[in-house]
Image: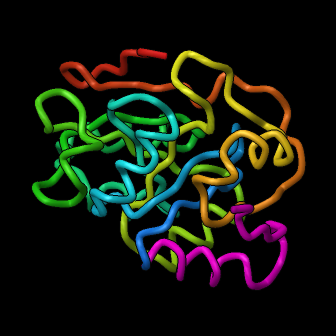
Amino acid sequence: MIPHIVKSEDPLAVEKSFNILKKGGVIVYPTDTLYGFGVNANNNYAIERINKLKNRQSPMSVIAYAFEQAMSWTNIKEKDIEIAKKILDSSSTLILDAKKSIVSNKILGRNNTTLGVRIPKHKYCYDISKKYDKPITTTSVNRSGEQPLNDPKKIIEIFGDGIDLLIDDGKINNSAGSKIYELKESKPIQIR
């Protein structure tokens, strides 16, 4: 089955994505670095669909439209807020302690306690994460160990049967993805 394809600038892109996410579907969407697989981060069935597509079981990050939204999902210490703002303003991912039951344990890291959060600098990401207002996964569109795909035609060719909607932003320049940081004793440590 070929997924539904909508251009990222289409006024209906966010509404269609919202409906697919609500129903437990899998979307592929553009960010400022790569295309990402997105599902409701509380839907175990949808998360398993991504894990099967990627041939792996590992933590996933989530996108937010604003710093306040991202922090509402975490247990950040007051003293770490300024450094967290700086990291998230740089289009990087920050791993923090997750609030209980905010997302499925299937996407959490380190003993099911940590969550990667990211605020992509992309209009579509801003709009969908503001409208949906629940954590949406963001993980590169690739099989484990392979390079991320940046061309919608290639994404459909390889993953078309496993996704419900592709938000097409054209071919994205090759990227290693976002940098990932973790805070250790209030100091940022880059882990990717």
Image: 47 above or below 173: below
- Look at the image and give the residue range highlighted in magenta: 1-22
Q: Is residue 60 left or right of residue 21?
A: left
Location of residue 143 with respect to 40 vertically, above or below: above
Please name the residue shown 40% across and 28% down the image: 56
Residue 31 magenta-highlighted: no
Quadrant location of the N terminus in the rendered image: bottom right
Q: Position of residue 24 (x, y in %)?
A: 41, 70
Q: On the image, which quarter does residue 136 sit in?
A: bottom left
Scheme of image coloration: rainbow
Check the image and report above or below for 128 versus 46: below
Query: In the visual, does 37 lie left or right of 52?
Result: right
Residue at the image point whose x is 72% and y is 76% from the top: 13
Q: Residue at x 23, y 51 (%)?
A: 74
146 or 103, nearer to the observer: 146
Task: Identify which residue, 77 or 106, lies in the foreground.
Answer: 106
Between residue 53 and residue 123, name the one nearer to us: 53
The question of residue 20 being in magenta is answered with yes
In the foreground, 164 or 185: 164
Q: Position of residue 81 (x, y in %)?
A: 31, 44
Q: What's the residue at 31%, 55% (across, down)?
A: 71
